Amino acid sequence: MKQRAYNFNAGPSALPLAVLEKAQKEFVDFQGTGMSVMELSHRSAAYEEVHNQAISRLKSLLSIPDQYEVLFLQGGASLQFSMIPMNFLSAGQQAGYIMTGSWSEKAIKEAELFGKPYHIASSKKNQYRTIPALSELTFNEQDAYVHLTSNNTIYGTQWKEFPETGNIPLIADMSSDILSRPIDVSRFALIYAGAQKNLGPSGVTVVIIRKDLLEKENSDAPTMLKYSTHAKTNSLFHTPPTFGIYMLGEVLRWVEEQGGIDVITQKNEEKAKIIYDTIDQSHGFYYGHAEKDSRSLMNITFRLNDEDLEKKFLTEAKEAGFVGLNGHRSVGGCRASTYNAVPFEACKALSEFMGEFQQKNS
């Protein structure tokens, strides 16, 4: 087999090789059914076991309390930007959004179609280099909910601690760092995440929603866009993305086999450290976008002082087998996404390449 690329794509991103190899073996004949998972009826016992095991594994890995539903939806985080206010924000009602990047900007724009969202705090003035300090946050008890983005793929920032919102439901987009570190699910009323970073392939959106929030759902939302529709039917109201859910379940199995969230967290910290150390020890040859206390363990954003040299770096990195190091098209620069399935060896190789490039071009 050809050597695998050093895959630093921001999403869809690297999947564990062991999971891909297992899926390859089962692709044509899943567990003696004579059918691929993609051919199974979503009403069949064989698929139902795949579906329920994925839910059970996620509940176990994230220690999700009993008062929460786990839903498998479609449409990505982008549909959640509108589905959340459609269900929980009434005309004239306020909701607070904490602005930390492009995805929170997109989320609040959708909420403006349904009610009166407002900025609780924003780090836009400093080009989203930081996460707002908890001391800066003031909440309005009348708010329908508070929304934040836990990790910002474009700017490379991540929440280290989450705000305490009291009786106001806290909602989080965790698309790019779910399953990468322990979280206290009970702090949130709703967590949503596109699968294509740490959970599996694109096409599945995980929603973890507290049952009492379902009771506050707007009755006039379309059937397919109501969370209760999917909660009542175990996410089987219509045909779900069955192969994507199968893959998600296998990624969760892989996380279990690695030793669970605590081991994954340790590995993520080690991977990020070797690259951040290379940046910090380069004497300004490389410099990070995010301030150190807001740095993401998932998306390491950095630049070179000279734009032509930056282009040369990206070109030579690609030739050396590194994929996905270009920064987001809206900001440019460089970005290494070190999600769960990116091996330490890839991060070490990138660190070494960066060091060699600096030596040759200083």
Image: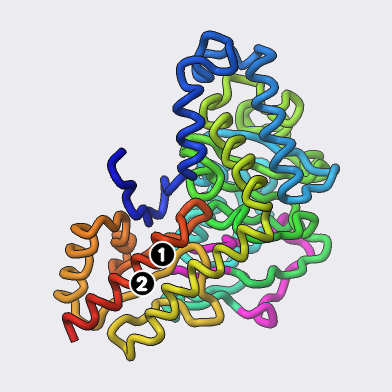
Give the labeled residue for mark 1. Answer: 347
| Bounds of the magenta segment | 133-158
x%, y% of residue 222? Answer: 62, 29
x%, y% of residue 130? Answer: 51, 77
Three-letter code for the amino acid on which mark 1 is drawn:
Cys
Three-letter code for the amino acid on which mark 2 is drawn:
Ser
Give the labeled residue for mark 2. Answer: 351
Determine whether, in the image, residue 169 is placed left or right of residue 283.
right
User: Is residue 85 visible to us here?
Assistant: no
Residue 156 in magenta stretch: yes
- In the picture as drawn, the residue positioned furthest to the top comes out as 34
Q: Secondary structure at mark 2?
A: helix
Query: 166 or 290: nearer the eye?
Result: 290
Q: Secondary structure at mark 1?
A: helix
Q: Are marks 2 and 1 in contact (CB under 8 Å)?
A: yes
Query: 96 or 314: nearer the eye?
Result: 314
Which residue is found at the position 53% from the left and 45% from the top?
Answer: 194
x%, y% of residue 60? Answer: 76, 45
Query: 26 or 193: nearer the eye?
Result: 26
Determine whether, in the image, residue 34 is placed left or right of residue 311.
right
Q: Quadrant of the N terminus?
A: top left
Query: 277 or 213: nearer the eye?
Result: 277
User: In which quadrant of the rendered view does residue 170 lie?
Assistant: bottom right
